[in-house]
């Protein structure tokens, strides 16, 4: 007797095709989700690294602030050593060679609607700003800045630590502490940055010693 030839029916072929298509779709969706997760993780890592770099840079610059004059107020004759506002801050600090020629430079940290958070540098000599031939444009630290709040803290007349201020009134001396609060579109609210100024602490200690003597 001849054996009957067996093959796949149309329903079996269609079922196998549907299962194959479903498996390929599932594999593609899994691969796509894994790729998107990896990209999001890489983006978050880059943003976190950028935030840490900016905060580290600001901490080093602020901590190296010097009680050095960069100008004199013509109306009062008071030396300008530190100007602090809610969204702008100017102070003198030494800079490494990669930021300039080295030595004391005026640091101008400010918030701008067009460029975000920027910092500019100008050379200081003999208590005055020196115009350089090749001027550098301000460096952008946070391009997607949404808000910036700078606050300052010093000593009261009785020697105790004062309250936080949005404007630093004593332009002839440094504050003891500076608070920087940043909010950007890509990260949101940054962790508050509070920096103590060692030179201001030494200056306050010497003044207190003179008073008690």
Image: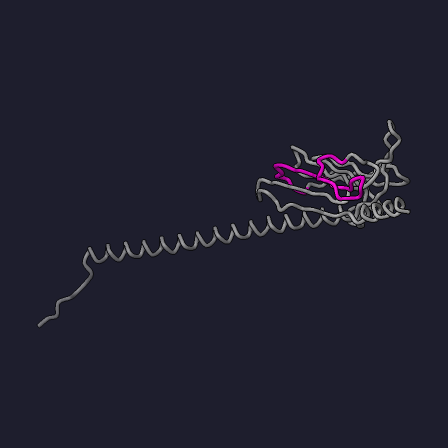
Residue 104 in picture, x, y percent from top left:
84, 45
| Pick the front one: 18 or 123 | 123
Quarter location, residue 4: bottom left
Position of 185 with respect to 72 (left or right) is left
> Is residue 137 in view from this perspective?
no
Spot the residue most to the bottom.
1
Q: Main secondary structure of the magenta part?
A: loop
Count how many numbered circles sit on residues in the image: 0
Residue 131 in picture, x, y percent from top left:
85, 36
Position of 135 with respect to 15 (left or right) is right
Residue 88 in picture, x, y percent from top left:
72, 36
Spot the residue most to the top.
75
Residue pictured at 86% horizontal, 39% vertical: 69
The magenta-colored residue range is 141-168
Spot the residue most to the left.
1
Residue 166 colored magenta?
yes
Residue pictured at 20% horizontal, 61% vertical: 8
> Is residue 202 in view from this perspective?
yes
Relative height, residue 22 to residue 72 (above, below): below
Quarter location, residue 154: top right
| Pick the front one: 108 or 37 | 108
Indicate how the structure is coloured in the image: one colour
| Pick the front one: 28 or 37 | 37
Residue 40 in picture, x, y percent from top left:
52, 50
């Amino acid at each position: 007797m001849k054996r009957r030839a067996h093959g796949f029916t149309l329903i079996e072929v269609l079922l196998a095709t549907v299962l194959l298509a479903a498996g390929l779709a599932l594999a593609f969706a899994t691969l796509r989700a894994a790729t998107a997760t990896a990209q999001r993780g890489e983006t978050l890592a880059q943003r976190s690294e950028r935030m840490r770099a900016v905060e580290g840079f600001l901490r080093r610059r602020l901590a190296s602030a010097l009680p050095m004059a960069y100008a004199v107020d013509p109306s009062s004759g008071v030396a300008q050593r530190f100007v602090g506002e809610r969204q702008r801050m100017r102070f003198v600090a030494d800079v490494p060679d990669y930021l300039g020629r080295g030595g004391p430079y005026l640091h101008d940290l400010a918030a701008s609607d067009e460029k975000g958070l920027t910092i500019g540098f100008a050379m200081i000599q003999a208590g005055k700003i020196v115009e350089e031939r090749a001027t550098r444009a301000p460096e952008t630290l946070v391009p997607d800045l949404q808000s910036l709040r700078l606050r300052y803290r010093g000593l009261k007349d009785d020697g105790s630590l004062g309250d936080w201020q949005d404007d630093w009134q004593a332009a002839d001396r440094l504050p003891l502490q500076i608070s920087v609060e940043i909010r950007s579109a890509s990260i949101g609210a940054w962790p508050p940055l509070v920096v103590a100024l060692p030179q201001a602490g030494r200056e306050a200690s010497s003044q207190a010693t003179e008073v008690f003597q």
